[in-house]
Image (tube, helix red, strand yellow):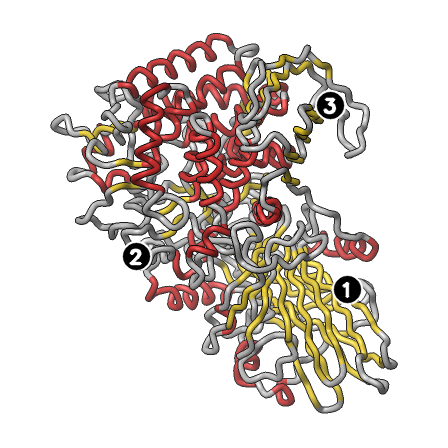
Amino acid sequence: MPAYDLHPWDDAGVANEPLGEAGAESGPGPFTITMDEDDPDDSPGHLLGNDRITAIAHTSGLVEAYDWSRGLRCLNRTRYLGHAGGGYVQVMVGEQVAVTAALSGGACALKRVRFGAGYLEKTSEWEGLRIDERVEAPHGDDPVLLHTVTVTNAGATAIEAHVAACWAANVHPVIAIPVLPKRFIRAVARWRARFMRRFTVLPKWDDSLCCRSAHYRPPWRAPRPAKRTFRDWHPKPVFLACLDGGAQPTTPDLTAWNIAPMVEEAFRRDPSVPLWLGQSITLAPGESRTFRFLFGTASASEIGPLVDRWRTAQPERRPCVDFDGEGIPDWLGREIAWHAAYLQAGVCYMDYFGAPIIDQGSAYSFLQGATGAPRDFALFILPMVYLRSDLAKDMLRFLLRSQDAKKGKFPYAFTGHGVTSGAGAHSMSSDLDLFFFWALSEYLNATRDYAFLDEMEPYYPREKGAQGTVLEHVRAAFRHLTTSVGTGRNGLLRCGTGDWNDVLCGFSWLPPVTALRGESTLNAGLATVVLPAMAGAVERAAPELAEDMRALARQQAAALETQWTGGWVARGTLGYLGKRLGVDRLFLDTQAFGVIGGVWTGERRKRLFENIRSRCVMPMKAGARCLDPPYRAMHLKPGVDTNGGDWAAINSWVAWAWSLEDPRAAWDFFLRTTMAARAEAYPGTWYGVWSGPDAFNGCDHPEPGETSNFVFTPMAEFPVFNMNRHSGPLLDVIKLAGITADGDGITIDPKLPTDWFHLGLGLHDITYHEGRAIGVYRPKRETRVRFTVRPPASVTAPPHRHRQHEASDAPNRWGGPRGV
């Protein structure tokens, strides 16, 4: 089986720049991955996507597309079932046939695969022909993939060939499974596939559109389309169109292909339909022909307009982050741009809620079929406020529309068409209101779009017709926080069945008692950060609510101080016999928020970070372990998951908090959390280099640097595409650049170890150079903004407060409001 060179972290898909030799200043260079000879479809993958569709591009040359609109489903399944799902080309010259994908037993022309920011590129060579392919999800909200094929005659004589774009409609519903042991993965895949056999598949050909499609007629007793259902009983058609015209439906030549057993078995299945389009061409020496194909899913009435639009449309450049400066490694700027592209590739759209959300991804979604949780959605919204504020606002709408009309509660997970769930053990998660406040306050204060508070949004379920203003949603969430979550005997917010740490009660000898009576210092610390920010955002519209929020924040700060152990803050109380968790060991997940919220200052803050450095950071090759020492007698092994694993989200909070104490140390720690650092620390582990899971095994585990594979979630079976791995570094760059916002205005107070840097975002452009600070701000609405601008942390100068500025709607050179 051939190996393939991969070049990640190119310049946002504009120009691929090989990264040189591995090193601290150059970042990891081109590296080689050899595919699994037994299962090439199970090879490492790369995520593509836009605001409506997601795709996984494999090093085998195959591409799987996913759609969330009515429940997660793969449109052209390849993994585990042996189907050749699509994303490649078949070329026939005379009686000889080759494909541009590594399929078992076939003549493979594939020579090189490149993963780029937002695209897959392949180069194939065979019989004097060179085939260059590019598959991308064009920026925007069209549920399509664009497959561009260029065939060149590299020989000295004319060549007659038949070229076909190969995609299949093999819909595979990823029906939710809350617990998925590794040994049951294939059996569950077969069980899910059987569901599609209930449908009648109707292949269609539209000559005017040059389009093949597969339509699905549900069984006669299927629920009506608008009904909330655990499974999708009304899957949308899947189609492939040739945008240049001239192509005709092509039947796979299975006998000449030498892979007949696998492909023939796949195409014999009733739900699987080949959507191949091809045409015969003659190329003179040196001549090239380019074909453009559109693969996607949409309702029958939407397919025609989509195809017509993309006959002339060209992909737009997606928003990106530009980060550069003196002393900032070149590879870091490319890695940050890569994170921005990946975070946008993780967007999914659900028809029931009528809004997009960035899903957590990884094994939680692609194996277990569950979309969640709102805390993760909030963490993804935070950097998106600055990169794509319109998308951040739509994601907030998704959260608002999922809020329970009676209780004001947010669900933990989403499955099927409009179905919400507490996912069993997570039905009493106590932190979701706080994370919602964090995301909403960041959006309101950063964009100054306070009019959003007056917009009407429905509650869940939407068919009940209940709705309220965004401010009323905020009141409902605060009421749920103070009454349903509430505080315990020590004054801290309760932990429920878990705060950010879903297995928090697993650290207790009496989990049910802890779920009812236990208290959380993570919730208390987070409250000191987000409640004052939320109060500042709603103060003009609801001063009494703002005061209640500030009062609760002060009360939580006071209660948090009682949990100081002398070197760190305890994790909370267990709810029985006065027991506290985290007195004898350091839980890293709860330490940062008290610093950001201003509870820990002076000597306490200094001592806290000394302990974090010595106990959590220094024992690790990269990142930080989240618990020291881990427990030895638990359902989790030492060093795995929250029992001492290395978590992307926690690292992000710690780097931000550390910058308030020691910017230089915070910067060094931030660099230790990068994918470049992980590639150097664990060169034998392929994941973590261009994407990864939410957590890696810590130094106490026998397999450090890898990820978990326990019974609930076999993360090692799908160890990439977790969006926490990409959102955390983006948030850190924004906060280390010193951008904060509250009800009073916006502050730029850099914590970077340089006096020259540039950070370009959708909302801000900030440049510090030669003793000057230059910035561009693009608010959502015409408004007055008070800016406080300070010099970098390495420069001593008094703060300079700008006068109030009034933003203008006149366009600037970026095409948005001129700003200030």
**Residue ID at (69%, 26%):** 775
Residue 777 x %, y % = 69, 25
Please state which amino acid type lies under the numbered disc 3: Gly
Q: Residues within 10 Å of mark 3 (few under 14, many from 20)?
A: many
- Left or right: residue 111 versus residue 37 is right
Per the model, the C-alpha gap separating discs 3 and 2 is: 52 Å
In the rendering, at what x and y percent does residue 215 appear? Answer: 63, 63
Does 394 sit left or right of 413 as displayed? right
Numbered tag placed on residue 711 in the rendering: 2
Q: Quadrant of residue 181?
A: bottom left
Disc 2 crowd rating (10 Å Cα; few below 14, some 14-19, many 20+) is: few
| Label located before the other in sequence (3 or 2) | 2
Q: Quadrant of residue 478?
A: top left
User: Which amino acid lies under the numbered mark 2 shown in the image of this protein?
Assistant: Val
Precedes in sequence: disc 3 or disc 1: 1
N-term-proximal mark, 2 vs 1 = 1
- Residue at numbered disc 3: 819
Mark drawn on residue 140:
none
Residue on which disc 1 sits: 292
Q: Residue at x 64, y 59 (%)?
A: 18
Residue farthest right in this picture: 284
Report the front residue among 610 and 596: 610
Quarter of the figure that contains the C terminus: top right
Image point (67%, 35%), residue name:
760
SS at mark 1 in the image: strand
Q: Secondary structure at mark 2?
A: loop
Number of residues whose C-alpha sits closer than 10 Å to that of mark 1, classed few (under 14), some (14–19) or many (20 or more): many
